[in-house]
Image (cartoon, grey):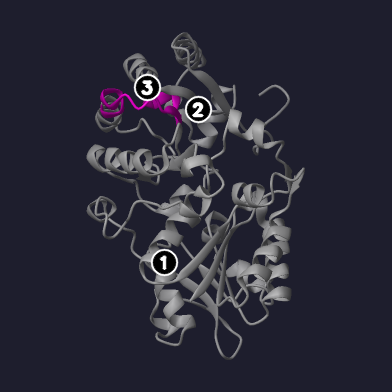
Amino acid sequence: MNVLLVVADFPRDVGTREQFLARPSAPAIGVNHLATVLRKLGHNVVVIDALFHALRTGFRTRIDTAVGTTEVLREMGDVDCIGISITSPTRSYALAIARAAREHAPHATIVAGGPHVSVLEERLLEGHRDLYDYLVVGEGDRTLPELLDVIAGKRKPAETPGIVYRSSTGSTCKTAARPVLCEHSLNDETLVPNTEYAQYQSFFDGGRVPALAMVTARGCPYGCTFCYSPRLWCTYRCQSPERVLSEIDYFRTNYGIRHLRFQDDTFTYNRTRCLAVLAGLRSRQYGIDLYAHTRFDCIDEQVIEAYASAGGRSLYFGLESGAADMRRRMGKNGGVTNERIGAVCRAVKKAGIRLGLWVMFGYPGETDDK
C-alpha cells in the first residue's frame, strides 16, 4: 500500500538552514517508528513532519503542514491510506490536514491516532465523521499494520483490537482495547525495530542526520491529573540498557548523530537503568549532546553528574506550578518542597546543564496568589 503519515503541527517560522544546523530539531518519533514497521511489511510510506517539510522546501519562511500534505500528495499520486497524528493543541490543524487530504486524495482512507485520539476515542469520530474513517487508540505498533489489512479487505474491522470506526450502517463502533507491548517485546528488535530515518538523509551532507530522538520507556509510573500518558500508554514499561545503547549505536553508525533527545516522560525514573545507559554512553565517547525530561522527585546529584559526564546538555523538569499546594492538587512531584526544587535546579546549572522548566497556567483552582 501507499501510505502517508502526517504529524499535525502548528504553522511556524523555521528560520534559515544555518540557524537550524546551529541547534537542530529531531524528526518526529512516533510516525517514523510506525513507518519503519510498515516498510518492513512491504508498504511504501512517506512521513511528513515540520522538519521534513522544512528540509524539502529549502526552509521557507513559513511552514504549514496542511500545505505540505497537499504538495506531497500531488507528488505521490495514488495514496491508499493517510494517517494523522494528533495532540490536543494541534487538533484544529489536524482538521485542516484532513480536509486537504479529502480534497486531494478523495479515495484514500484517513486514519487518526495519537494522544488526542486516545483520550477522546469515539467522541472524536462522532464530531468529524466526514473527515476520519478510522481511529487508532493507544499504541499503533500492531494496530496500524492490521488496520491496513482491513483497508485492503483482508481483515474485518470488528476483529481488529484498538480501533474506532464507522460501520456500514453509519453507526460508531469501538473494538476491544489492544493489549500493550510487554517489556520483553520492547526489547525484541524483530517486534520493535530500530527506527529508520532514511528519507531525511538526502538533505544532509554524507547522509548525516544531526539530531534524532528516541523513547526508551513507554508510559509513566505516576498519575498527574492533567496528563494523557496513562490513557495512551496504560502502564510503564522500559527497555533494557543494552537495547537502548544498541539503538544509539545504530543511530551513530547509520546517521552520524550529534544530538540525541530522550523523549521518555521520566528518563531518570529507574535510577539503575538510567545510570547504566549513561555509563555506556560515557564509555563510547561519541561526543553526542543529550536532552532529556524528568521530575524533581526522580533525580539526585549523582544522576545529574553522570548525565553531565555522558554528554547531558539540557534537562527539562515538569515543575507545573511554584505553589506546593497546586502541585499536590495535580498529583505532581510527590510533595517535593520548593527548597528541594531550588537545590536540584542549582545542581543542574552547576553541572553546566541547560535547565528547562515546564510550567502550567490556569489549572482549576489556581488564583493570582497560587
Circle 1 residue: 38
The amino acid type of the residue labelled 1 equals: Leu
For this view, does 104 lie left or right of residue 174? right
Q: Is 56 or 211 nearer to us in this picture?
A: 56
At x 51%, y 60%, the residue is 118
Residue picked out by circle 3? 307
**In the picture, residue 256 is in which quadrant?**
top left
Is the residue 182 above or below the residue 291 in the image? below
Between 224 and 275, the one lying in front of the other is 275
**Alpha carbon of mark 3 to alpha carbon of mark 2: how far?**
14 Å
Q: Name the amino acid type tagged 3.
A: Tyr
Residue type, label 2: Phe
**Magenta-tinted stretch:** 280-298
* Badge number at residue 317: 2
The residue positioned 55% from the left and 77% from the top of the image is 80
Residue sitting nearer the eye, 13 or 114: 13
Seen as rendered, the residue at the extreme right is: 61
Residue 237 lies, with reference to residue 341, above or below; the image says: below
> Which of marks 2 and 1 precedes in the sequence?
1
